[in-house]
Each structure stands twice: as C-alpha cells, then as structure tokens.
Image: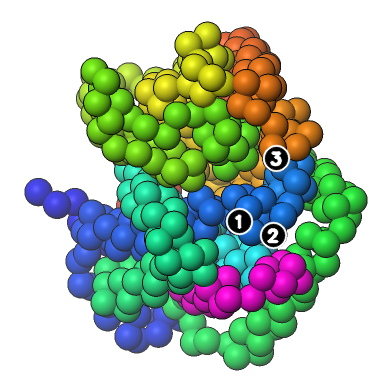
C-alpha cells in the first residue's frame, strides 16, 4: 500500500493561500512525489555529465591546453559549481521557495549548455558559458535534494534508502550521456554533443511541467506565497554578478585558489557559529554532520580523478578494446570510460538499498560513520587495481577490464560515502537549516574538487607526445599514492567511529524527546477543542 503524506497543520493555516490549502487535501504518495524529483534530477545530470565527460578533453584537444591548465581549470570550475548551491539553498529556503528556485536553475542550466553548443571556441566565450552553468547549478542542486529531504522528513531508515535511489537517478542520467556525448562528438563534433546536453535540460523542465502537482505540497515556506518580483529581480541580478565573477576567476588561477580557500574557511566559520547558537538538543547532530562533511571532502579528492587523471590515463595508457578470448567485443573512447562509474552504481544501488532495508527491519541500523569507513576501504581497493594493472601492460597500455573492476570498487566506495552525504544532512540537521546545510555540503565538495585537480597534476605530462611507456609510470605512481590516502581515510573513519556512535545516540535521544513533546502538545490542543 502506498504511504500517504499529509500536512494537516498546513491545511488549517489561514495564512496559506486558499488554492494551496485546497491542494493539501488531495493525498499524494511519497513515492509519486519522489518519482517527480527523481526524473528531474536524472535529466539534469544527463546534461551536466554529458558536458563533464567532454570538457577536459575539449580543453586539451580543441583549445590546446596543457594537462595542468586543463586540470586546474576543471578544478576551479567544479569548485564553483559545487559552492554555488550554498547560495541557492538559502534562496530556496528564504527568498523564492525550493520548487521555484529548482526550476529556475534548470532553465539557466539549459541556457549555459546552449551557449556551449554555439560553435565559438573563443576562450572568453567558453568561460562565460561555464559561468552561466555555475549559476544554474547553484540554483538547482541544493533545492532538488532539499525536496527529497522534505518528502521523507522524520523517517531515518527511508531517508537513507531514498537518497541512495536518488543517487541512482544521477547515474542513470550520467551513464547515458557519458556513453552518448563522446560518440556524438566523434561523429558530429564537439558543439553538437554540447547541444545534446541542452536537450537533457529541456526534458527536465518538461518533466516538471507535466508532474508539478505531485510536488504542490512539498517545498519551503516561500513556495506557498505569491512570487515577489523584486526578490526575483534581485536573484537575477545576483546570478549575472556570479556569472561575471566566474568568468573573471577562471581567467586568473591565483584568484581561483584564493576563492576556494576563502569559501572553505567561510563555511567552517558559519558552521561553527551555527553549532554555537543552536539549541542544546540540536548540537550533537550538527557536530556529527561536521565530522562527516570533513570525510566527504577527503572522498571527493578521489572523485575528481574520474574527470581528470583517470580520463587522461584512459586516453594515453588504456587499450580502448574490450577483448574476450582474443575477440574484440567493442571499443570505447577515453571519455566513455567514465560511464563505468554510473553503470556500477546502478548495479550496486539496489543491492545496498536491500541491505539497508534488511538491517532496518531487524531493528538495527548500520551507522553512517561505519558506512564511510567501508567506503574508503573500497576506494583504496579500487586504486590498488589501477596500480596493479601496470604489471600487465603491453607497450604501455593496460587492458580495459582493469578499468571495469577498478571503477567497480571505486563506485562502491562512492555509494557508501558520497551517496549518503545528502542523507547525512537530512538525518542530522534541523529542518530550518536544511537548505543552507545542503549548500554547505556542496561547498565542501567544491573545495575538494579543486584539491583533487591539484592532486591530478602529480601525473601531468611534460608533453602531449610522450610515449605510452613513459606516461604509464607517472599515472601508476599517482594511483598508488591515492590508494594509500584512501586507506588512511578508512583508518580515520574507524578511529572516529566511537565518537560518531555517541553523537548519533545523543542526537536520536533528543529527536525522540522533541517528537514526544510535539505529540503531547498536539494531543493537548485537540483536547482543548
């Protein structure tokens, strides 16, 4: 039986518009509401990862960037992409509403990909296109995740499962686009491939228009109020300013570095302030969230290698043929190897959801901190596979199958760490802070995106013409170091496990007490009527 979600308080609130209150009486299942956000996120990620699969190679092959320049440009861009949702989350919570902000962000992203589709290879124009994408992602990303949190609010076990499935939407979209856009690029050119990314965003917007009723009861308080055009104008002006800032930052590497570190310290300071000013009952959850966000920062250093060092490794040192018993099954381009990540995640996500639900039914709950430790262990094993592949190289090129199994372990780690990052915010952070905290989470990942691009440059090629036999040792050395770093991450997560268990128990106790007080107050109000 479908689980129904009602907001009875909202239906009685006279401050709500009549139309909104009327809608509240129409029951909408959590599953239908979640499906709408799932599909929107899937098409949005189709657009983003289609672009992401190509951008570093576009800079190296089409614009003539060095490996170092391309890696750092990608790192600065993705840092801004992930940092921008901290502002977008606040806009969704306090200014325009989560639903409105999400769909405006989708429209801006569509415009950014359309700009890349225009055959203009001038460097300033590309940076301007990336600036528009930063703005669009900032408005979209935190608010889409916040809607999922609001759909399953108060149900910790289902939140973990929901965000794991939500993460699967990311990977359905990215799998198709990462396989399709490199193939389209090979046959019809770079800009046609970017146009396909724009098409993905158009489908996301169409999806929302067709299914918007399922989200009518989900959102932040401003969603229920009429649009305030002055606020919308202010947001538009801020978006233009952010796009121009992005354009300038990408043209000046030192400024990009300073921006990344400024964002990191600002978020840490704000987080500390929120912990200090929070209610005593909320403090344990916020501290737990801070510790876990720190671990997420470490993980994304590994994640960014997919678009940088692993893609360039596939270009220079991986046999593009998938062979079985001496027969070539099919051939992939370097960019298409990135699709192994979402393919594995789609295969593994249902398994993990089944495990989480099985554990929940038994009356236990595997702590998020324990999942993080297991995740880092899986990442370490994945980089061990990449490192070992060099022993079986032929003329400096390794078998494609090593990429398959290395990505498999790497993806399991991603599901256990990154896939639960948003669920961790939903579990430990009070609802009134959720939009900002979703944004803060993305800022933290943005910082690590840039750090990851710096790490990728440890394997930068002195020349594009370097033979495969000479480039191979550079990449293997990098992957070995990354494996050891992941092992250290696992050790730290294990050492922090007792602290995290204590904070989690304290948070749960305080949550139960607040829930009991709310029920008693509700019962008293009913009795008084």
Q: Nearer the viewer, residue 308 or 9?
A: 308
Q: Which mark is residue 63?
A: 2
In the rendered structure, which disc, 3 or 1, sits on the residue that comes first in sequence? 1
| Residue 190 visible (yes or no) | yes
Where does the C terminus fall, quadrant-wise?
bottom left
Question: Is label 2 in contact with label 1 (beta carbons under 8 Å)?
Answer: yes
- The residue to which callout 1 is attached is 58
Highlighted magenta segment, given as a residue range: 98-127
**Measured from the top left, where is residue 369 in percent x and y?**
52, 22
Element under disc 1? helix
Nearest to N terminus: mark 3 or mark 2 = 2
* Contact flag, marks 3 and 2 (Cβ < 8 Å): no
Residue at x-position 42% and y-position 34%: 320
Q: In the image, residue 220 lies at what x, y percent?
A: 49, 67
Q: Nearer the viewer, residue 421 or 392?
A: 392
Residue 512 position by quadrant? top left
Picture disc at residue 385: none
Q: Is residue 391 magenta?
A: no
Is mark 3 in CB contact (under 8 Å) with mark 1?
A: no
- How many angstroms separate mark 3 from mark 2 (CA)? 13 Å
Q: Which of the pair 189/373 is nearer the observer?
A: 189
Q: Residue at x 27, y 69 (%)?
A: 214
Depth-wise, is mark 3 or mark 2 nearer the camera? 3
**What SS does tag 3 mark?**
loop
Instruction: Relative to 371, say whether 195 is above or below.
Output: below
Which residue bears the numbered disc 3? 464
Residue 259 visible, this angle: no
């Amino acid at each position: 039986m479908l689980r129904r979600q009602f907001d009875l308080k909202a239906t009685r609130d006279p401050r709500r518009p009549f139309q909104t209150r009327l809608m509240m009486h129409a029951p909408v299942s959590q599953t239908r509401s979640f499906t709408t956000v799932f599909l929107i996120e899937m098409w949005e990620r189709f657009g983003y990862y289609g672009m992401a699969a190509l951008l570093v190679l576009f800079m190296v092959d089409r614009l003539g960037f060095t490996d170092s320049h391309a890696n750092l440009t990608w790192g600065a861009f993705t840092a801004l992409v992930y940092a921008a949702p901290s502002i977008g989350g606040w806009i969704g919570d306090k200014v325009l509403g989560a639903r409105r902000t999400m769909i405006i962000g989708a429209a801006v992203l569509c415009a950014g990909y359309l700009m890349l589709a225009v055959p203009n290879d001038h460097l300033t124009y590309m940076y301007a296109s990336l600036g528009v994408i930063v703005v669009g992602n900032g408005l979209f990303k935190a608010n889409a995740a916040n809607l999922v949190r609001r759909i399953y609010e108060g149900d910790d076990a289902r939140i973990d499962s929901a965000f794991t499935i939500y993460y699967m939407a990311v990977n359905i979209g990215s799998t198709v686009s990462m396989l399709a856009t490199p193939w389209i690029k090979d046959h019809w050119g770079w800009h046609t491939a970017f146009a396909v990314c724009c098409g993905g965003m158009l489908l996301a917007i169409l999806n929302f228009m067709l299914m918007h009723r399922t989200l009518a009861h989900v959102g932040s308080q401003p969603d229920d109020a009429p649009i305030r055009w002055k606020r919308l104008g202010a947001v538009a002006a801020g978006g233009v300013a952010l796009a121009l800032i992005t354009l300038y930052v990408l043209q000046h590497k030192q400024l990009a570095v300073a921006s990344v570190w400024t964002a990191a310290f600002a978020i840490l300071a704000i987080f500390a302030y929120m912990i200090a000013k929070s209610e005593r009952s909320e403090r344990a959850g916020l501290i737990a969230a801070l510790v876990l966000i720190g671990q997420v920062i470490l993980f994304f250093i590994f994640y960014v290698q997919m678009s940088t060092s692993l893609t360039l490794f596939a270009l220079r040192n991986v046999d593009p043929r998938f062979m079985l018993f001496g027969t070539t099954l099919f051939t992939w381009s370097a960019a298409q190897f990135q699709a192994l990540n979402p393919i594995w995640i789609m295969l593994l996500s249902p398994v993990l959801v089944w495990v989480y639900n099985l554990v929940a039914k038994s009356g236990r709950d595997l702590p998020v901190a324990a999942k993080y430790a297991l995740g880092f262990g899986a990442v370490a094993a994945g980089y061990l596979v990449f490192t070992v592949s060099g022993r079986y190289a032929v003329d400096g090129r390794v078998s494609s199958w090593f990429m398959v199994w290395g990505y498999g372990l790497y993806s399991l780690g991603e599901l256990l760490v990154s896939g639960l990052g948003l669920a961790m915010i939903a579990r430990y952070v009070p609802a009134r802070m959720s939009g900002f905290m979703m944004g803060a989470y993305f800022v933290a990942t943005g910082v690590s995106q840039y750090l990851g691009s710096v790490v990728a440059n440890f394997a930068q090629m002195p020349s594009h013409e370097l033979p495969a036999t000479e480039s191979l040792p550079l990449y293997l050395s990098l992957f070995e170091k990354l494996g050891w770093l992941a092992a250290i991450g696992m050790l730290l997560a294990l050492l922090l496990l007792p602290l995290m268990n204590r904070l989690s128990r304290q948070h749960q106790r305080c949550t139960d007490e607040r829930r009991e007080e709310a029920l008693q107050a509700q019962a008293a109000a009913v009795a008084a009527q």
